[in-house]
Amino acid sequence: MVFLSRIYTKGGDQGETGLGNGARVPKDHPRVSAYGEVDELNSVLGLLAAYCPDTPEMQLLHTIQNDLFDVGADLCVPPADGETNTNALRIVEAQYLRLEHAIDRLNEHLSPLQSFILPGGTPAAAWLHLARTVCRRAERSLVTLMQTEPVNPQALIYLNRLSDFLFVLGRKANETGGDILWVPGKSRPNHGESK
């Protein structure tokens, strides 16, 4: 269990922060950026829960919020060379398999897509699309980090599955009102006319 007795430590006043292994790095280090964006994603899901408590799969979304803290903890402690058995919290396959099962279960009852979807629709769907885009940004930051530093690859897989889950759940949240479909070139002059 984590125990926080002081909120401010003044340790970051010079632009550095501590990783979980005790190393000090600049606050704009790619590792800090990656787990910071995971934290931002978690906050978006918190807003979804606060403003749209009737969103489908809310219990699973709460589990995902906890998983995202696990992702942050995983990223905060760089894997040691040749790491095989560690006390560090690492994302495991079961966590993203849970997302795969939920995607399959939800998608089975949705109509096939005939076009790309515009973000929006119900308030819950709009929040879910925002969460999806923040998740994709966190995923890109993690890929950037992986080019220079060791990272648990399961964390990347988790974020990739999560963005897919958020997309499908956004569709589920729009099930009664319908998805807003992209119409290519809709606002262009002479839309729909052949030349």
Image (cartoon, helix red, strand yellow):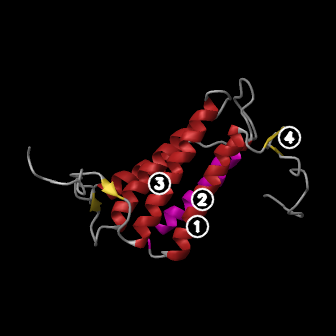
- N-term-proximal mark, 3 vs 4: 4
Q: CA distance from mark 1 to mark 2?
A: 6 Å
**Farthest residue, direction left:** 194
Q: Nearer the viewer, residue 53 or 82?
A: 53
Quarter residue 145 falls in = top right
Q: Nearer the viewer, residue 154 or 101?
A: 154
Residue 22 marker: 4
- N-term-proximal mark, 1 vs 4: 4
- Mark 2 — residue? 42
- The amino acid type, in three-letter code, at marker 2 is Asn
Residue 56: tell me if it is visible: no
Mark 4 surroundings within 10 Å by alpha-carbon count, few (fewer than 14), some (14 through 19), many (20 or more): few
Q: Nearer the viewer, residue 194 or 42?
A: 194
Looking at the rendered image, the quarter that the N terminus falls into is bottom right
**Mark 2 falls on what kind of element?**
helix
**Mark 1 falls on what kind of element?**
helix
- Mark 1 — residue? 46
Q: Please name the predominant secondary structure of the magenta segment in the image.
A: helix
- Residue 175 horizontal side relative to residue 80, left or right: left
- Mark 3 — residue? 132
Q: CA distance from mark 2 to mark 3?
A: 11 Å
Q: Are marks 1 and 2 in contact (CB under 8 Å)?
A: yes
Q: CA distance from mark 4 to mark 2?
A: 24 Å
| Highlighted range, magenta | 55-73
**Mark 3 falls on what kind of element?**
helix
**Farthest residue, direction front:** 189
**Mark 4 falls on what kind of element?**
loop
Q: What x and y, as percent, mark residue 88?
A: 74, 41
Q: Is residue 62 magenta?
A: yes
Front tag of 3 and 4: 3
- The amino acid type, in three-letter code, at marker 1 is Gly
Quick check: 150 above or below 60? above
